[in-house]
Amino acid sequence: MGSTATRKRIDPRRLEVKCETHKIGYATRDAALDACEGQMTRGSVEPGCHIEPYRCDSCGDWHTRNRRITFPRD
């Protein structure tokens, strides 16, 4: 009887975190948008949210975040 992997893989870019937010930094908005699309495709988005890039005030890189766009009904 087989089992499925339950552990998440660690992104190697997280090993060299330079931002105090501990998020992955992207050099360009386009690279962050690509990451957002990948996260949306994998389902790494909260209900009622959309993943979007933003420029970090701490490190100057681009990060991704969930932004609420609607409030789901219970």
Image (spheres, rainbow, N blue to C red):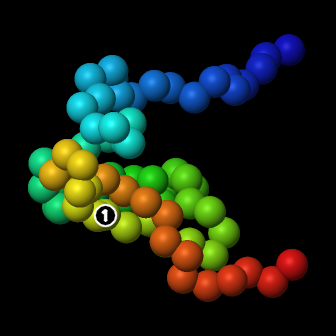
Q: Position of residue 34 (x, y in %)?
A: 27, 57
For residue 26, say whether it is visible.
no
Between 48 and 41, the one lying in front of the other is 48
Type of the residue with mark 1: Pro
> Looking at the image, is 43 positioned above or below residue 9?
below
> Which residue shows up at 54% across the image and 82% down it?
69
- Which residue is farthest left? 28
Quarter of the image that includes the N terminus:
top right
Q: Position of residue 54 (x, y in %)?
A: 29, 64
- Which residue is farthest top? 1
> Which residue shows up at 77% across the image and 20% down it?
3
> Which residue shows up at 44% across the image and 65% down it?
51
Q: Quadrant of residue 8?
A: top right
Badge count: 1
> Looking at the image, is 4 positioned above or below residue 72?
above
Q: Position of residue 12 (x, y in %)?
A: 33, 23
Judge left or right: residue 55 versus residue 64: left
Between 22 and 44, the one lying in front of the other is 22
> Looking at the image, is 47 positioned above or below residue 43?
below
Q: Quadrant of residue 21?
A: top left
| Residue with the mark numbered 1 | 53
Quarter of the image that includes the C terminus:
bottom right
Judge left or right: residue 29 versus residue 37: left
> Looking at the image, is 1 positioned above or below residue 10?
above
The secondary structure type at the circle numbered 1 is strand
For residue 25, say whether it is visible.
yes
For label 1, count other residues whose C-alpha is less than 10 Å away and answer few (under 14), some (14-19) or many (20+). many
